[in-house]
Image (cartoon, helix red, strand yellow):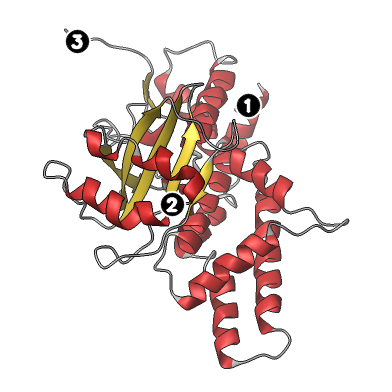
Amino acid sequence: MTAYAFLTIVCDGCFSNLRRLPCKPKLRSPSHLAGWIVKNHHLPVANHGYIVLTDSSPVLTDSSPVSLYPISSTEIHCFVAIAGTELPSTSNGELSHYLRTVVAPQIPHELYSVFTSEIDKRSIRTMPSYSMPALPYPTPGALLLGDALNMRLPHGAGGMTVALSDVVIPRDLLSRWHNLNDASSLCTYLQAFYSLRKPMAVTINTLASVVDKIFCTPPTQATKEVREVCFVFFNLKLPFLSTVEPAMALLSGLNPSTMSLVLHILLFAIYGAASVLLPFPSFRRLWIGVILIWRPLDNRMAQDVSALSRPLTMEMCWLLIL
C-alpha cells in the first residue's frame, strides 16, 4: 500500500532510514551504552540520580561514566558509557565480566548492590551512542525532527529535552499555516523551524560535548585536576555568584540561553585557570590552565555556537508574523 501526504514529518529516531533525503548525515559513534533495569532496589536519596566517574582500564583507555536514576517507584535504570568502537561481547559474558571486575569495584558502597544485582542475569542491553550535527536542506514535503535530525552524546541526558522542543516548535508554526497544498511555500515557511530550534539544541549539544571532554576522556593527571576544579567551581557559595542553579537550568533546558551558556563556560575557564596558576605559576600549572580553557572549546562546540549567528531570513520573519 502506498500513502501520500502533503507533509511528512520524519522522526524515526537515531537509526533513521529516511534522513538521507532531507539532510546530510555525519554520524560519529565514539562510544557504546550498556544499560539494564534494576527492580525492587532503592537509591540512597529518593528521586535523585547519581553519576559515578570511573578510571580507565587496560581494556579501555577512556573512562566509563556510570549513571543510576529512578524511572518508577520500583525500578532504577543503570547504564555505563563505554568508550571506543569495540564493545566487550555480551554473548560470551565478556561485558558482564568487565562490569563486575573493572567498573563495579569503583562504585561507591551505597550504590554497589544496586549496580551489581542484575549484571549476571543477561538482562543488559547495548547500543552505540551517536553524535550528529543538524545539517538539513530544504526538501518540499518533508520535515526532520528529533534524533533523525540531530543527536548528541548521552552524557548530558538532554536528548528527550531537544526532541520535545522539536515537537513544540513545528506545532506552533503549523497552527498558523492553513494551506498544506502549497509544498514550496510550506517548505520555505518551515525553514524557520531549523532556526528557532537552535537556542535549545545548541545549549544541550554544547553541554553534552563539554561533559564528554571533561569527564569521559582518559584520566591523566591534568584532566583529573580539571575535574577537581569543576567540582569546586560548582560548589562555590558566594552571595553575588550562584553556579549550580543556572548550570542546572541550562542542562535541563529550562533556560536555553546561549549568552548564559557562554558566560558560564568563560567563568569556569577563568576560575579554573586562576585557581591552578595561583599562588605560583609553573609550566605544569600553565599547561593545566590551557587545558581548562581549550577543553570546552572544541571544534564541534564552536560549530554549534556559530550556527546561532545565522539569523532568520526576512522572508521567514514575515511568514512568522503572518
Q: In this view, does 71 lie to the left or right of 58?
A: right
Classify the position of the C terminus by image quarter. top right
Residue at 70%, 52% in the rendered image: 259
Q: In which quarter of the image is residue 245?
A: top right
Residue at 49%, 11% in the rendered image: 179
Foreground of the two, 271 or 321? 271
Q: Nearer the viewer, mark 3 or mark 1?
A: 3
Q: Quadrant of residue 196?
A: top right
Q: Label 3 sits on what residue type? A: Thr
Nearer-N-terminus badge (1/2): 2
Nearer-N-terminus badge (3/1): 3
User: Residue 22, image x and y in percent?
Assistant: 33, 35
Numbered badge on residue 320:
1
User: Residue 275, image x and y in percent?
Assistant: 70, 76
Q: Quadrant of residue 171?
A: top right
Residue neighbourhood size for the residue with mark 3, other residues' Cα within 10 Å, grouped as few (<14), some (14–19), many (≥20): few
Check disc 2 and report its element: helix, strand or loop: loop
Up-down: is 229 above or below 135? Answer: below
Mark 3 → mark 1, Cα distance in angstroms: 33 Å
Q: How many marks?
A: 3
Numbered badge on residue 107:
2
Q: Label 1 sits on what residue type? A: Leu
Nearer-N-terminus badge (2/3): 3
Q: Is residue 184 left or right of residue 268?
A: left
User: Residue 227, image x and y in percent?
Assistant: 56, 65
Q: Residue furthest left?
A: 92
Q: Label 2 sits on what residue type? A: Ile
